[in-house]
Image: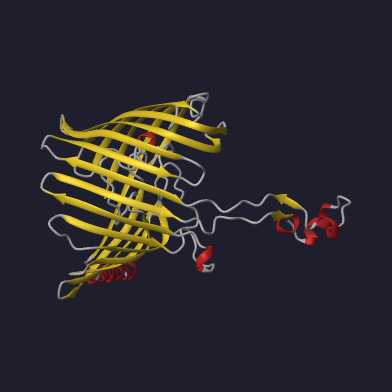
């Protein structure tokens, strides 16, 4: 009897909590599947893969009406790997998004951790590519391209909609940390315009990272060992003679990165053709143009997606791909992919994808499926 009363009390407490926080939503996605892939010069691999089409995650989001057309809200979202239960990013409680915002007649202003304008999460405005930032080598953010990902220390503003147009400005005071003086932090700057009305969705985004804090000092023996640890090795070398010896070279400050993305989509009802373009000027000497044509359509009760893209430009980099190819000169690459999502219910769907990539010039021998190789995927996604 006593246990029953305690249980009833606990349930009552949770009911009260749910009532008090009725504007808070718990949500999530779990996606797991099997991927078969092979990169040029690499082995055939068969793996269980979590989040190939949509990253597995759970989250909490809420909003409060402040009156007079104003509201405050938040998003807390954590990614995880469904195949092993590990957090997607070690050490972060909400690695995908941790964002607080205010909305009103002025637009929307928020701050925290979120995705860049050209990536994903609540502040992103990327358009023009059917696969978006997902589907492995078919992603607009795959290794052949250049886009920004999730960032810490973000300030983000979006204007109200003016006849379908919205303006977006984003700044990161430090992509991973802003604990140093301003000139030693890595900053992100993004500005974009999005249009969404009737059958058209389109966006133009300019982004840059200044890489101010990217230089690293040389690593000394004293950075790796304490004096007592060194003496415990008993290798015959005095601590005073070795403590200032260099064991890791310093790296110079990287150059800024600039990326422009443009996308256009036109909904024809049964299908939506799309066009995307990217210009990227990267810190390690890569300067590329990438064009993509894709489409999505309702087919046999599900959603079909097809996309092809072509990239050309120059690259000056070392250690590209698993075989660490050094490149210096012209590069070429093209990819093609197809995906299908069939809903088993409102929350559960079967997903399939097949893609192929081939590169030329300096990237011809790179061992990476995003450059040279194929991927085939079959999985199941459940949303709650």
User: On the rendered structure, is 362 left or right of 51?
Assistant: right
Can residue 190 be seen here? The reply is yes
User: On the rendered structure, is 242 left or right of 162?
Assistant: right
In the rendered image, residue 40, in percent from the top left (x then y), is placed at: 49, 24
User: On the rendered structure, is 373 left or right of 244?
Assistant: left
Residue beneath the point at 49% across and 36% down: 315
Q: In this view, does 90 lie above or below 106?
A: above
Residue beneath the point at 47% across and 56% down: 210
* Colouring of the image: secondary structure
Of residues 287 and 223, the one nearer the viewer is 287
Q: Is residue 181 above or below residue 288?
A: below
Residue beneath the point at 31% across and 37% down: 380
In the rendered image, residue 23, in percent from the top left (x then y), is placed at: 22, 66
**Image quadrant occupied by the N terminus:** bottom left
Of residues 113 and 179, the one nearer the viewer is 179
In the rendered image, residue 251, in percent from the top left (x then y), is placed at: 62, 51
Can residue 95 be seen here? The reply is no
In the rendered image, residue 284, in percent from the top left (x then y), is placed at: 52, 44
Q: Is residue 254 above or below residue 344?
A: below
- The image quadrant of residue 293 is top left
Of residues 173 and 4, the one nearer the viewer is 173
Q: In this view, does 358 lie above or below 248?
A: above
């Amino acid at each position: 009897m006593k246990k029953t009363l305690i249980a009833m009390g606990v349930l009552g407490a949770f009911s009260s909590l749910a009532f008090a926080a009725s504007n808070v939503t718990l949500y999530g996605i779990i996606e797991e599947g099997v991927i078969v892939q092979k990169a040029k010069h690499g082995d055939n691999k068969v793996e269980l893969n979590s989040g190939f089409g949509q990253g597995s995650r759970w989250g909490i989001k809420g909003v409060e009406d402040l009156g007079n057309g104003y509201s405050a809200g938040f998003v807390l979202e954590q990614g995880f790997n469904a195949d092993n239960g590990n957090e997607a990013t070690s050490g972060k409680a909400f690695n995908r998004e941790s964002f607080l915002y205010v909305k009103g007649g002025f637009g929307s202003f928020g701050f925290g951790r979120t995705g860049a304008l050209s990536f994903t999460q609540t502040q992103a405005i990327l358009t023009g590519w059917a696969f978006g930032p997902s589907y492995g080598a078919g992603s607009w953010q795959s290794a052949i391209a250049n886009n920004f990902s999730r960032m810490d220390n973000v300030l983000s503003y979006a204007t109200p909609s003016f006849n379908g147009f919205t303006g977006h400005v984003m700044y990161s005071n430090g992509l991973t940390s802003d604990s140093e003086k301003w000139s030693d932090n890595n900053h992100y700057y993004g500005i974009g315009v999005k249009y969404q009305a009737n059958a058209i969705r389109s966006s133009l985004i300019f982004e840059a990272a200044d890489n101010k804090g990217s230089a690293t000092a040389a690593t000394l023996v004293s950075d790796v060992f304490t004096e007592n640890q060194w003496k415990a090795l008993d290798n015959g070398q005095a601590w005073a003679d070795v403590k200032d010896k260099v064991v890791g070279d310093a790296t110079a400050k990287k150059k800024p990165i600039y990326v422009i993305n443009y996308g256009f989509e036109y909904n024809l009802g049964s299908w939506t053709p799309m066009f995307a373009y990217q210009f990227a000027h990267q810190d390690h000497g890569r300067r590329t143009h990438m064009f993509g044509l894709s489409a999505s359509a309702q087919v046999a009760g599900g959603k079909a997606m097809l996309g092809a893209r072509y990239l050309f430009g120059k690259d000056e980099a070392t250690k590209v791909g698993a075989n660490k190819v050094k490149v210096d000169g012209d590069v070429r690459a093209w990819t093609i992919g197809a995906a299908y999502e069939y809903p088993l219910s409102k929350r559960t769907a079967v997903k399939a994808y097949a893609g192929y990539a081939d590169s030329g010039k300096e990237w011809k021998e790179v061992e990476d499926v995003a450059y040279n190789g194929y991927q085939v995927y079959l999985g199941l996604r459940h949303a709650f």
